[in-house]
Image (spheres, helix red, strand yellow):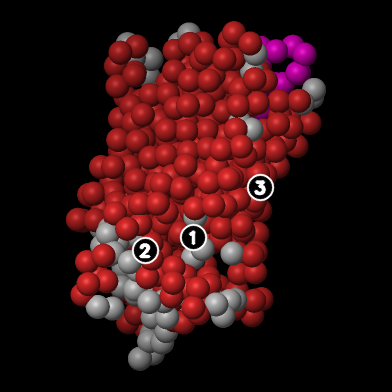
Amino acid sequence: MTSSRARAHSFRTVLPVLALCWLAVFFDGMDVNIYGAVMPHMLDDPGLGLTPSSAGTIGSWTTFGMLIGALLAGNLTDWLGRRPMLVASVVLFSLGSAVCALAASPGAFGGGRFLAGLGLGGLMPLCLAMVLEFAPPRRAALTTGILMTSYHAGGMAATALGLTVAPSVGWRWVFWAGVAPALIAVPLLFKLLPESPGVLLARGERERARGVAARYGLPEPALVEAPAGGAKGRLAAVRALFAPGTRWATPLLWLASFCGLLLVYGVSTWLPQLMRASGYGLTSSVSFLLVINAGGIVGMLIAGRTADRFGAVRVSAVWFVLTAAGALLLREHLPLGVTYAVVALTGVWLFSAQVMVYAATDSVYGGGERAAGLGWVTGVGRTGAVLGPWLGGALAANGNESWGFTAFALAGLLGAAAISLVPLAGRAGRRRAPAPAQSGIGNPV
């Protein structure tokens, strides 16, 4: 790579990719948070027949769909490309939102949420992989943090819809708003989003890969940086995650992601209802979701800049511990103003703790394994996303809502322990690895 190309590779050159992925993830965050924002209204709707227990189960259907969607997207990307898969993901969760708006029973509504989950699960790892590939040197954590501010901006938009549209015209119209991504984002993604140079190279389209790299100031793609194609390539990529330099770090990243996504989706689904059960009014309870997402936006920017200086692993571990402390404080019925402050600060730490787990994969895996590593970290972590909403529903159904905050605190402490051990695991693996290491596998943590 020449010095002129190095100077060209900056936020300015990759801004179009970041902006388009930001828009896609904005709608992802809106769709995920819509359910929590309108759940109190849905529970009060006798025509739907939703109960706290079935509400938690439906929340888990959504995240189970995400688990399947994340794993399918990683495999189909080899054949179809990242841009078509991103478009398909947006179409799927928009269609799922339409099914929810029309649902006449909890079962039909759950089917719509499962369909939406398929699209949501594929979208996030694809956008993260795109942004990490196009990110300027030594700015992976900051770029990831900027991308993920969109998730919380979408969550705030969902909460605003829950506070304004649901009380006036009904919760179904909030889900009709979830159809907007298919009308807004899909044409823009088709027209403006480039394909991944690494994916193009893996498919044998060398000239196209070079053209995209040159257009965005990226280094010329090399085969070692390209994700492996085909079934054999996918199997080889998974085996590489357990190579001597990464075999112990990989399960720790999975565990940290599990804990982080349990927190993210458990809180996004159940915070309004948990706060309502703690004695706060309906409007205040829903507005807490707005506040925690506002804190999430601030947290992403703080975490991204801090992680680029001190490392994503350290920041993620500290953020997990602070999240646990915030969750324990929310068990107490504090004055309303103090509660808003605690919720906002908890949002600063909670969401970016998980995102810094994603950012940590950039230093654990080499270029050829990065997409597979990130896909499996997000995919396995989705089991936590499945458990979080179900756990909240089970506790609410038994009148033990306050224990939900304790469960979230324990998840935060376990996540901190897991991510803290990743550097030690990486060093232990490299000490046992035969020399020389091959294909860039097992980059230092």
Q: How far apart are marks 1 and 3 (CA)?
A: 23 Å
Q: Does the stretch in magenta take in 54?
A: yes
- Which one is earlier in the sequence, the residue at label 1 or at label 3? 3
Say what amino acid the circle numbered 1 marks. Answer: Pro
Q: Where is residue 304 in the image (x, y as percent from the top left)?
A: 28, 49
On the question of residue 411 being in view, the answer is no
SS of the residue at dot 2?
Answer: loop
Q: Distance between the residues labelled 3 and 2?
A: 30 Å
On the image, numbered disc 1 is attached to which residue?
194
SS of the residue at dot 1?
Answer: loop
Q: Are marks 2 and 1 in contact (CB under 8 Å)?
A: yes
Q: Position of residue 202 (x, y in %)?
A: 54, 77
Q: Are marks 1 and 3 in contact (CB under 8 Å)?
A: no
Say what amino acid the circle numbered 3 marks. Answer: Leu
- Give the residue at x 26% y 65%: 8
Can you say whether 342 is above or below 8 in the image? above
The one nearer the camera, 218 or 235, is 218
Q: Residues within 10 Å of mark 2 (few under 14, many from 20)?
A: many
Q: Residue 216 carries which label?
A: 2
- Give the residue at x 42% y 54%: 17
Q: Quadrant of residue 363?
A: bottom left
Where are the magenta residues, as a range? 43-56
The one nearer the camera, 244 or 108, is 108
Q: Does the stretch in magenta take in 129?
A: no
- Give the residue at x 75% y 18%: 48
Q: How crowded is mark 1: few (under 14 residues within 10 Å), some or many (20 or more)?
A: some
Say what amino acid the circle numbered 2 marks. Answer: Tyr
Q: How far apart are marks 2 and 1 (CA)?
A: 9 Å
Q: Residue 118 carries which label?
A: 3
The one nearer the camera, 398 or 101, is 101
